Amino acid sequence: MNKSFTERFAQYTLPQEVKAMGIYPYYRPIESGQDPVVRMNGRDVLMFGSNSYLGLSDDPRLKEAAIEAIRKYGTSCSGSRFLNGTLDIHLALEEKLARLVGKEEAVTFSTGFQVNLGVVSLGSRDGYIFLDSYDHACIIDGSRLSHSRVLKFSHNDLRALENKLKIAEIDAPKLIVVDGVYSMSGDLAPLPQILDLAEEYNAAVMIDDAHGLGVFGHQGRGTADHFGVTDRVDLIMGTFSKSFGSLGGFVAGDATLLNYIKHNSRSLIFSASMPPANVAAVSKAIDIMLSEPERIEHLWDLTRFAREQFVRRGFDFGTTQSPIFPLYVRDMVKCLTAVRDALDAGVFITPVIPPAVPEDSVIIRFALMATHTFEQVEEAIDKLEKIFRRLEIIC
Ligand SMILES: Cc1ncc(COP(=O)(O)O)c(C=O)c1O
């Protein structure tokens, strides 16, 4: 084997150095379901690092639905949707998803990552793709696989987007891809204004609503519904690994777009379909979301409560508008130390450090679930306040 390939790997020792400092924050094993309280190393820990916004991933009804699907269909589809891996429950779920987000059709992929990879990469050689600088990694990777020119604009900066749109010829194919809710900063894309620009400059718009579905819009229908702009958005994608307590993803749009995607998207055609258990769990999660609006109401009550608590105690949490709180630390070692100390104190939170963000944007991500109680939120924030003060992150 060519040594130069593996030498670079062997020289990469940053994780070992961080481990030696006792503040390595990754791959921490959890011994239970993703509930407000999880078991770690034999003890109870408050979970504030999850994406299970509706608290459904350990819900008995989802588990039962998944078990039933395994009994009927087995554990795998043994192939892609395109050839042998389409089940009747895939089709039923796709109809449900299309109705949910207000689009004509939808198609499911095995992960949300694969949706963006497989759809954004369909950009054409003479086209342009416009990306917000905070867009998720899989959108960026999808754009890299396309043959289009990729132009990035600064986060939520409409003037910067317009300046980039002006670069492209008016009749060139153009796609703007933004997150509905940004996974780390918790703020929303200004969709109505982005759509105004898209219409003026003849661009299509795709939203990644991984963190908006189940949280925003009527009955959790997502960010486009929240802004009342569903008809103006060309493609809406979402994942099942956040609010819907499962794994997989989908994209929805009109029948013409879906026809092309279903016959050309490589991460759909050349990858095995969502396993039956995952399909059944998502379908049940959507039913529960629609029939139990109190879950989303409680999530928002908790969000308002946490916001008041963080303000009162002097935390800096940027411009979030969602149940995701980016607690600014702006120092990598302090951030990792706080994450370790929080776990020692019984609170699981997650760090966001370089290269994911620049050093001055280092944050701890604190995310709520509809199954948390006010007492759990207050207890966690109490503990974080003590740690943040000791490390002089807040004063
Ligand atoms: C905004 C966004 N898009 C896409 C994905 C990928 O989703 P999945 O976990 O289903 O692959 C994620 C997950 O981290 C995400 O946060």
Image (tube, rainbow, N blue to C red):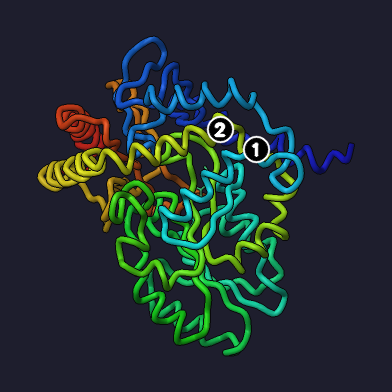
Report if residue 383 is visible in the image.
no
- Rounded to the nearest angstrom, the CA distance separating label 1 from label 2 is 8 Å
Name the image quarter holding residue 303.
top left
Identify which residue is drawn at 31% across, 16% down.
44
Identify which residue is drawn at 51% across, 80% down.
164
**Above or below, 75 relative to 291:** above
Please give the residue where the numbered disc 1 appears in the rendered image.
Answer: 12
Q: Where does the image place residue 308, in percent across and percent down from the top left?
A: 12, 46
Q: Where does the image place residue 127, in percent across and percent down from the top left?
A: 65, 77
Q: Which mark is residue 15?
A: 2
Q: Is there CB contact under 8 Å for labels 1 and 2?
A: yes
- The number of numbered discs placed on residues in the rendered structure image is 2
Quadrant of the snapshot with the N terminus: top right
**Above or below, 87 relative to 31:** below
Asked whether, in this view, residue 158 is left or right of residue 104, the answer is left
Asked whether, in this view, residue 114 is left or right of residue 93, the answer is right
Give the residue type at disc 1.
Answer: Tyr
- Disc 2 packing (10 Å; few <14; some 14–19; many ≥20): few
Give the residue type at disc 2.
Answer: Pro
Q: Where does the image place residue 257, in percent across and percent down from the top left?
A: 60, 67
Asked whether, in this view, residue 395 is left or right of residue 30, the answer is left
In the structure shown, which secondary structural element does the residue marked by tag 1 occupy?
loop
